[in-house]
Amino acid sequence: MKKYLIVGCGFSGAVVAEQLTKNENCKILVIDERSHIGGNCYSERDPNTNVMVHKYGPHIFNTSNKKVWDYINQFCEMMPFVNRVKTVYDGQIFSMPINLHTINQFFNKNFNPKEAEEFIEKQADKSISEPKNFEEQALKFIGKDLYQAFFYGYTKKQWGCEPKDLPASILKRLPVRFNYEDNYYSNIYQGIPRNGYTEIFRKMLSHPNIEIKLQTKFNGSFNIDNFEHIYYTGPIDAFFNYKYGRLGYRTVYFERGEEIGDFQGNAVINYAEENVPYTRVHEHKHFTPWENHEKTIYFKEFSKETGNNDEPYYPKRLEEDLYKLELYLKEVEELKRYTFLGRLATYRYLNMDQVIEEALKIINE
């Protein structure tokens, strides 16, 4: 019987494990440094409020890939959920992404869709033909006023540097809607699992041939001799003991609050101004509107550079990072019996559906 090792118990590792046991008779060992399964998608009931909390920040599942949607629905009851994000700027609350309501409110106008589109076209900086950075990308699409209000301060807080120092690729597309649609996502399928994300992982990893070892670190002393293949989903730079240097990540940390009733009336509210130290506040009972809770729990989210003991969240992918990445990827090509997949192992920002899609493709090729 073949034996496989999977390093990491997030969606990449869990999908690979579930698919391997489905496709062949094998033994699988899944290891993870943390004390729980699920990676950054881990959710749990808060003991004081009984609210289901997304431990590492909000996770709203959204995709237009029916195959991925059908796959995830095997393991949970996915409840419909529309993410209606609000942003606080200059004492007012605006809808995000920028839509017709945002434009009319911000500029104190009463535009119809065509008028708004023509107005924003005039705001855009037409002198920028090929944006060289994040700031130029935003100015090219929406102009200075909307950029300064909703993107400059928020981006600086989130990434810890001037937006002009970030690559334009971070802002690949800037959704500006010339109607009153305030659904944050535009994908066909959107939802949140009724009983949280951890239930999904328990079901995915429930096969008797899957063994899980938590609080187990993968390093040079880990014996891999008995494994047919290793699927690695941890940080690519950590795998090589940072021989070419650490790759840049931003991480987040949270400040917890608890109230009776309702704290902010919405799941997610962004704080765009630079002088507010946190980027957003999420109130988790609003992620489960099918539940009733007397108490509420909320988290202020702060962004910072990733230290040695922090969980990496967002790959910065600056020029120096991409140079180091190429060196690491050349090392990966020389490895036998290894597959690197997922956000950390490939140093890309991937949504949950993209992670699942990639894992399904790799294991079924």
Image (cartoon, grey):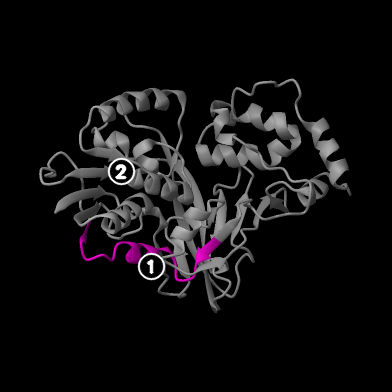
Residue range in magenta is 191-214
- Residue designated by label 2: 234
User: Height in image: 62 above or below 303?
Assistant: below
- Residue closer to the observer: 95 or 76: 76
Label 1 with label 2: CB-CB less than 8 Å:
no
Q: Helix, strand, or loop for circle 2?
A: loop
Q: Residue at x 64, y 45 (%)?
A: 272
Distance (Cα) linking label 1 and label 2: 22 Å
The x and y percentages for residue 354 are 47, 46
Tell me which corner region of the image, top left, top right, bottom left or bottom right, holds residue 139: top right
The earlier-in-sequence mark between 1 and 2 is 1
- Residue closer to the observer: 262 or 176: 176
- Residue designated by label 1: 199
What amino acid does circle 2 point to? Gly
Q: Residue at x 88, y 48 (%)?
A: 112
Is residue 310 visible in the rendered image? The answer is: no
> In the picture, which quadrant includes the C terminus?
top left
Question: How many neighbours does mark 1 have within 10 angstroms: few (below 14), some (14-19), or many (20 or more)?
Answer: some
Is 198 inside the magenta-drawn segment? yes
